[in-house]
């Protein structure tokens, strides 16, 4: 693979972010060995920022180092998707327990923000290529905004870490336009239930949305040999 050379300002962060982007978008194959000398030569940087980037990527769960063997891109498998959906469901249900404690004005403002995100997403998916839509991160914006309803930064950070971890690699490789449109419509169902303060319907809509995402992603992974 040919990688673009990067300038020397904020060198370590730029090296990390570039490699992370390439891994998430699966421009490196699952289980591919990452050679420090090769990456150093292609990026035009010394080996030190490459080592630092790989160390950070290992903390992100995107690569793994095998002693005396090398560093490899972590493959995403069906069990990863199952674990991810379970954890997301747990956090989103927790948010529902906190929503009744919000002042009405604050809740209404946050619901309006959710609608704005969905309206922008709906417009973009109809008028732009799928890859452009996925790069916009509207799905992530919606879910983080929903998690922020509970006003707990720690849980929001945990959720963001989950979404930036394996899910994005799966999404950019396997998501179709049909899946995006279905997800947007499911998000609208969540918002409508929130507006009516029918929290049992919100819970049902969240479960339906996440289980649908799980089933679709598993099917796509199975079609791709069980991993990506």
Image (tube, grey):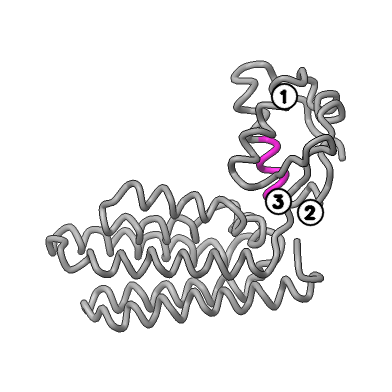
Estimate how packed mark 3 is, as few (under 14), some (14 to 19) or many (20 or more) residues with alpha carbons within 10 Å. some
Number of numbered discs = 3
- Identify the image quadrant of the N terminus: top right
Q: Nearer the viewer, mark 3 or mark 2?
A: 2
Task: Give the quarter of the image for residue 219.
Answer: bottom right
> Which residue sits at x=70%, y=65%?
77
Asked if labels 1 and 3 touch by Cβ distance under 8 angstroms, the answer is no
Magenta stretch: give its range: 18-25
User: Residue 144, percent across and down?
Assistant: 40, 56
Q: Secondary structure at mark 2?
A: loop
Q: Secondary structure at mark 3?
A: loop
Task: Give the quarter of the image for residue 39.
Answer: top right
Judge from the rendering whether residue 28 lies leftward or rightward of residue 104; answer left or right. right
Identify residue for label 3.
Answer: 25
Judge from the rendering whether residue 79 lies leftward or rightward of residue 91; answer left or right. right
Estimate how packed mark 2 is, as few (under 14), some (14 to 19) or many (20 or more) residues with alpha carbons within 10 Å. some
Q: Which mark is residue 6?
A: 1
Q: Magenta stretch: residue 60 in it? A: no
Identify residue for label 2.
Answer: 30
Going from N to C along the chain, the mark reached first, 3 or 2, is 3
């Amino acid at each position: 693979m040919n990688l673009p050379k990067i300038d020397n300002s904020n060198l370590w962060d730029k090296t990390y972010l570039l490699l992370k982007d390439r891994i998430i978008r699966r421009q490196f194959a699952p289980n591919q060995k990452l050679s420090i000398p090769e990456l150093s030569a292609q990026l035009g940087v010394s080996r030190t920022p490459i080592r630092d980037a790989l160390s950070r990527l290992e903390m992100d769960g995107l690569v793994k180092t095998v002693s005396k063997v090398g560093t490899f891109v972590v493959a995403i498998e069906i069990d990863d998707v199952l674990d991810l959906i379970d954890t997301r469901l747990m956090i989103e249900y927790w948010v529902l327990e906190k929503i009744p404690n919000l002042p009405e004005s604050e809740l209404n403002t946050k619901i309006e923000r959710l609608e704005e995100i969905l309206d922008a997403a709906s417009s973009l998916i109809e008028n732009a290529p799928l890859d452009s839509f996925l790069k916009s991160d509207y799905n992530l914006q919606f879910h983080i905004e929903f998690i922020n309803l509970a006003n707990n930064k720690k849980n929001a950070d945990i959720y963001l870490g989950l979404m930036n971890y394996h899910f994005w690699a799966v999404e950019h490789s396997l998501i179709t336009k049909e899946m995006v449109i279905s997800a947007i419509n499911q998000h609208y169902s969540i918002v409508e239930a929130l507006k009516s303060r029918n929290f049992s319907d919100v819970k049902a809509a969240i479960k339906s949305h996440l289980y649908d995402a799980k089933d679709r992603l598993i099917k796509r992974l199975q079609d791709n040999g069980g991993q990506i």
